[in-house]
Amino acid sequence: MFRWRKAPAEPAAVMAALHEALLSDVELKPVLHNLLSATTRQLGAERASIFLYHPAEQNLRGEVASGVNQTVTTITLPLSRKGPVQEAFFAPPEGIAKEGDYLLPIVLQAAPSGGNPYCWVTPERSCTISPKATKLNRALVCPSCRHFGVMGVLSLEGQFQEGTRELMPLIARSTALAVRNARVYEEVTESRARLAQRSRQLELVSALSRQVVRNLDLGAILETLAVRLHKDFGYYRVTVAVNQNDLLQGFLTVKEGQVYSTHGHSRIHIPIQGSSDPMAQAARLRRPVLATKGQLPPWVESESMAFVPITAFSPTFLEPGKPAQTQTDMEVLGVVAVDHGPKGTEVAVEDLWYVQLLCNTAGVAIKNARVYAEQARLSEALALERSKLTEALEQMGDGVIVLEEDRGFANRLAREALGLEREVGLGDLPDYLYPALEGRELEVELAGRAFSVLGTREGRLRVLVLHEITQRKLAEQAIRESEARNRAILQAIPDMLFVVNQEGRIQEYKSAREEPLSVPGQFFLGRTLSEVLPPEAANRAMEALHTALTQGSLLFFEYQIRTDGRLRDYEGRAVQIAPQQGLLIIRDVTPQKDAERIKSEFIAAVSHELRTPLAAIMGFAELLTSGEIPLEEGQEFLRIIYDNGRRLKNMVDNLLDSSRLEAGRFEVYKRPVQLEETLRGVADSFTGVAQLSQVEFHREIPPLPPVEADPDRIGQVMGNLLSNAFKFTPKGGRVTLRAMLEGDSLKIEVEDTGPGIPESERSRLFQRYGRTQSAVSRGVSGTGLGLYISKAIVEAHGGRIWVESEVGKGTTFSLTLPLHAAQPQPA
């Protein structure tokens, strides 16, 4: 058959023309038309067609150009049928040739690497999905696969030269690019149109939302919603029903621009549960319901009507831990019905989204209005309660400051204590109260009054309470002072205090000082008197305690305990302090007993010492008065009387010196003297005593430097020391008096060969009335004042006196006197 043919253009010109056709427009149909026209002109094709795949219909729809400048026609080929175009749809990029005609797949993506074919070309070998595609089923399987990239088929009919045929796959690839770009442009254009329409509608919704949410009145909110739906969205009629206890009741209707209030006299009276009415269905489902004419009440003349619920979040949605919102979380407040009237169109489903959005906004506004009304009611009640609370706080006996955030109220006592106003801020409070606001308890003193300050915090509310504790502080101070006095008294009283019950069990123990007990004081607690005292002492204490508890009188008792190897004397007093509780006051009276014993011994010794010389004086005086005594014998009697009189004088002087020492009036009169003369004089006075006692008496008195001293008092000391030495030195023994220089002191020693002094008795030697047991037991005379006075005299000179002794070998008394640069008195 003869075919008309035109000479093809050069390949470069062909591609340039095709690119010009591809870039000539951005919409799909003009691009395809221009491409087909350019193909027939430039390639010399008799006819050119482009078949594009449409997934929804599963067919290939083609634009066919018959020759140059021929009319374009449209044909449709089902993909499931067999034909050359359907076969080319799954062909490789070079397409297929049928009797000189070429059919090429329009594929945008590049061919697989390594020269491998597309998977849909050889599905049996290349398909990897399940169910696996085959050549028999690929028309059904491959187009929906993510690997499939064929967009359509390019059909070229005519006689083509070799160079032209080589361009055909490239032409098909360019066609795929043009198709993709055109489709992208169409999608963008459609998206822009939809966005512009939605933007306009959203502007209307936003404006209406702002107008609705400004209202806090239910009627104003619903009227604004209905009027705006009528004006801005063109609804013929807008009807609003409200939910009152699960019953939808008509509230208002806007019809042809007029507002009709139907509240209380509406024909709409529909129960939400159990009713088949579309308005009730919308309320139950919480989503829009579109009803046709047959589903509407008889009095409603309209082709269709949409029912949109007015919803808002229910209170349960705001509970902590509640998951994301669901339909059941929405509270139905009412339903809005819209339609276009008896002569209008049906309600568009896509418009209901905006109506629903407005209804939701109205629902929020209604909830806000209800919340506002409830808040107003609560605020009024709160103001009343706050007024009552403020009045109650004003009458409280404590200072109270209540702060909400940083502002609050101070009651009368708080204002007086801190100098505040009735309305107070956080910054008005003193800094030292801030820790109390964080929960710490403080004690402060304000204007001479003591307060305990305690703060609490609950969320935004902080409360500060000032409780006056002035009287408590005064009482505590009085208690502390009383306790201090009691402690001082206890420290001053040399007693042990035992609190015991009626069984004699010790419950408390107090002592101002450590007593010479055989066990620690804490040992007594919880024990009975019979467990800590000897039987005799415990019996006496229990008898006194029993009498004190039964008669309520003060009882005295005494007992002795041996501690540290010595028998000590204790005096006790028992007194009742509670119905079944007594107080035992125990005092160690050993020193008093010792003093009484020493006093008795001293009186006996003084009486004996006075009686002996007095008897001698009176006896020899009586002999002298008889007149029958020879002269020489009479002189001897007078000497004896003189010696005993001097002995009495020394005893009286010692007693007087002892009294002066106790009274603090003892004095010495020091002057520069040569003490060797005093020492020799005293030694000479004991020569006769040594002869009578048959005791050897040695004197070692070298020349001595002058000393500032009272010679009479030093002579008194030496007399006491020598007298004691001769008293205790047996016949044939030896007494030595020696003086020497030792550094910057004069040292004097009196040494004897007597029995010696036990170490346990040496501490008593220089005490008042202190005498050794050996002296008392041997009947050696003495008052126990000599060494006591001697120690005072030596120390008054700034010196020191001490004793060294060894039992069975003798005793040495030593004293030192400081030297002074003094000149001796002229003779």
Image (cartoon, rainbow, N blue to C red):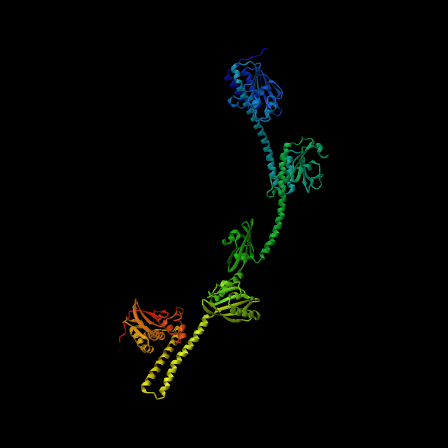
| In the depicted structure, whether residue 272 falls above or below residue 703 | above
Query: Which residue is at 63% across, 33% downward?
Result: 351
Q: Could you tell me residue 78's position as x and y percent?
A: 62, 21
Q: How many marks?
A: 0
Residue 130 relative to residue 821: left or right: right
Residue 293 relative to residue 409: left or right: right
Please identify the quadrant where the N terminus is shown: top right
Q: Could you tell me residue 103's position as x and y percent?
A: 57, 18
Please identify the quadrant where the C terminus is shown: bottom left
* Along the line of sight, the residue nearer the viewer: 398 or 665: 665
The answer to whether residue 770 of the structure is visible from this angle is: no
Toward which corner of the image does residue 308 lie, by quadrant?
Answer: top right
Residue 39 relative to residue 812: left or right: right
| In the depicted structure, whether residue 415 falls above or below residue 616 | above
| In the depicted structure, whether residue 547 falls above or below residue 119 | below
Q: Could you tell me residue 797's position as x and y percent?
A: 34, 70
The answer to whether residue 683 of the structure is visible from this angle is: yes
Q: Residue furthest right?
A: 298
Toward which corner of the image does residue 662 lie, by quadrant?
Answer: bottom left
Q: Residue furthest left?
A: 827
* Along the line of sight, the residue nearer the viewer: 448 or 734: 734
